[in-house]
Image (tube, grey):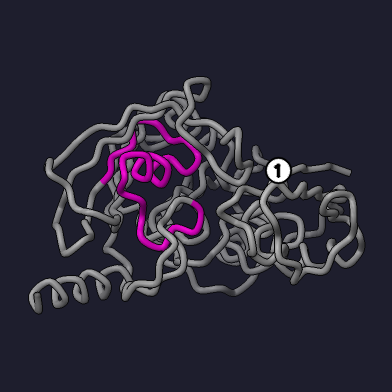
Amino acid sequence: MQEYSFIISEEYEGERADRILAMLMPDCSRTYLQKLIKNGDALINGKAFKPSLSLCSDDNLLLKLPEPVLPDIAPENIPIDIVYENNDYMIINKARGMVVHPAPGHFSGTLVNAVMYHTKDLSGINGVLRPGIVHRIDKDTTGLLIICKNDESHRVIAAQLKEHSIERKYEALVHGNFKESSGTIDKALGRSPSDRMKYACIPSGKRAVTHYEVLEQFDGYAHIACKLETGRTHQIRVHMASIGHPLVGDPLYGIKEKNFTNVNGQVLHAKTLGFKEPGSGKDVFFDSKLPEYFTELLERLKGRSKQK
């Protein structure tokens, strides 16, 4: 059994315990976490609690996560957008709200379940829960992912990820307007010392570099492109928040306000991928369109700006 301990920060005071626990443990479904709470496997200040309990700042939240009994991950006939496929890899344009791979309490409805329905040829380097998965993006982030179909292609792509030679560009919608048209954020990232559900810019973290370009500005918002020089967890989300431009809809690093955008989850799309192809060694490049919700949001912002 694994134990996770968290101290609740002031900004989450009054929030439901099960909601915050789901944010702390993003790889576990909220239903599964509610079950653990009811079974007494989660404690607040050493005591059992109901999922609906409102948290207080400085509460000590302890979760006892049972060792997973690994099920047979079942192929599921879930529609996925396959941009490209050959014998070595696939390029998938992941939908918003889809978890990349199974995890305790969340063994179905993932991208892995969908890919396994499409093909039986997947790399096994990352184990039975992550066949074919060499990198990932967050549940509410849309866009391009590489799925490896054999172990050799997995090793080739993993090496490029490690040396930061894969070209990755994202587009995002952020709060605020910029004076400059572009910039670079070079700030080390690591787990936040004050809030374990977050990452933060800390000197002891791993080097992280994000280059950004302003594509269009609206009244209080900006559409930007980001090129990753490194690929740290939540890198774009943390970096943009650190310079006063958090992503719209971001539940962890965003601005808590009711606004006309009315989105849940960060507005972030992994738009392009460029790398040396396993097998042939040639340079390949893939691009994708912004998802419909993103383009509709941009149109609404344009219309709102014209009215003022």
Residue 24 left/right relative to 90? right
Q: Is residue 244 visible?
A: yes
Q: Amino acid at mark 1?
A: Gly
Can you say whether 305 is above or below 120 in the image? below
On the image, the x and y values in percent for residue 146 come to 45, 48
Task: Tell me which residue sits at (56%, 73%) in the image.
Answer: 78
To which residue does mark 1 refer?
A: 127
| Quarter of image, res 256 | bottom left
Q: Is residue 145 magenta?
A: no
Residue 308 left/right relative to 177? left
Q: Secondary structure at mark 1?
A: loop
Front residue of 143 and 279 = 143
Can you say whether 299 is above or below 152 in the image? below
Range of magenta residues: 226-252
| Quarter of image, res 239 | top left
Number of marks in picture: 1
On the image, the x and y values in percent for residue 209 come to 34, 30
Image quarter of the N terminus:
top right
Image quarter of the C terminus:
bottom left
Task: Tell me which residue sits at (33%, 37%) in the image.
Answer: 228
Q: Is residue 242 magenta?
A: yes
Task: Tell me which residue sits at (51%, 53%) in the image.
Answer: 252
Q: Residues within 10 Å of mark 1 (few under 14, many from 20)?
A: few
Front residue of 135 and 120 = 135
Front residue of 182 and 245 = 245
Task: Tell me which residue sits at (22%, 69%) in the image.
Answer: 298
| Quarter of image, res 263 | bottom left
